[in-house]
Image (cartoon, helix red, strand yellow):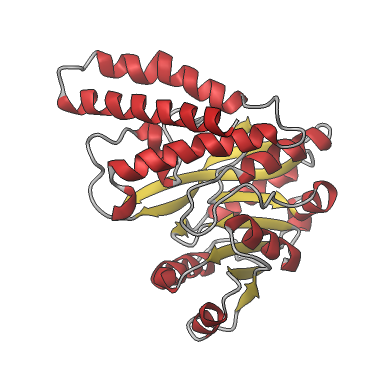
Amino acid sequence: MVDDLARVSVVVSTYTPERLQSVLDCIHSLRMQTLLPYEIILVLDPDKDLVEFYRSKVTSDVKIVVSDEKGLSNARNSGIKSAGGEIIAFIDDDAEADRKWLERLLVHYSDSDVIGVGGSAKALWSKKRPIWFPEELDWIVGCSYKGLPEEVSVVRNPIGCNMSFRKVVFSEVGIFNSVIGRVGKKLLGSEETEFSIRALSRMSGSKIVYDPSAIVYHKVDSIRQNLRYVIIRSFYEGVSKALVSCAQESSSDLSTESHYLKYLLKVAFPSRLKRLYKLESLAQIITLLLSTFLVFLGYVKRG
């Protein structure tokens, strides 16, 4: 039952002092939850100056953990190892949680078959969304994208900046694959995808739930609001998916990507073609085509 799983460890990780204000905003949002976390764990890259900096900036109720190695996957793994809760939730250092975030996530664990729950990530643009940037590509900036389910659904994997798993899952199937995922500003990802596929394949009858009402607000800085970032991130998404395909037990499950591509072809492109006389629609079609091509290119080159 939910009451037996009420202890939730929340893991936040960061690699730079430049994210200080965002980290503090994130921690504040966790302290304001309707269901308070059992503990807040801040994982830092193994950098002495970075550790000393954050020790002087965060209060003692935040558990600081130093990662074994650099990289997001390694940071999350270090958080897992030090977590004391039965549920481990993950949020990015540049995201803020809605007050009912943990409450919404936890309710689904009343089903014993549920091994993981994720929610939606809404984009907080530092500037106005560029007219050429379609909502279908919000995954590029780490947010929920148009084409995802709009109601509670069983999914293959959650979004990395808004996900949770039972701690026992990590004991049974292992931790995040550190070969996959971001290191500093290297724009790889999909470690949560590989882990989810592995967990679902090994734990018979298990499922992962997506609840769009479990919301985090993900900041989108100006660096990610230009075409250059879209190009690089799209290419490395293809590389990441190739790494997932090559990973043990996951080679046959790119069903989510297949569904997304069908959505683009059947919904996203046709809806804009009807409004092709608008500059916004034309620009978004070009961006969608460019991103899709670059994902494919990255997948083929790495594969």
Quadrant of residue 143 within the rendered picture: top left
Which residue is depicted at the point 23% across and 28% down?
283
The percent position of residue 4, horizontal first and vertical second, equals 79, 57
Q: Give the vertical position of 114 relative to 100 (above or below).
A: above
Q: Judge left or right: residue 146 versus residue 155.
A: left
Any part of residue 84 in sight: no
The percent position of residue 168, horizontal first and vertical second, equals 81, 52
Report the label total: 0
Which residue is depicted at the point 59% across and 54% down?
103
Q: Give the vertical position of 286 relative to 12 (above or below).
A: above
Q: Give the vertical position of 275 relative to 47 (above or below).
A: above
Any part of residue 135 in sight: yes
Of residues 43 and 47, the one drawn nearer to the viewer in this rendering? 47
Q: Judge left or right: residue 290 versus residue 47.
A: left
The percent position of residue 134, horizontal first and vertical second, equals 32, 32
Of residues 81 and 183, the one drawn nearer to the viewer in this rendering? 183
Which residue is depicted at the point 71% across and 46% down?
109
- Quarter of the image with the C terminus is top right
Quadrant of residue 132 within the rendered picture: top left
Q: Judge left or right: residue 14 versus residue 164.
A: left
Q: Give the vertical position of 281 relative to 49 (above or below).
A: above
The percent position of residue 90, horizontal first and vertical second, equals 60, 56
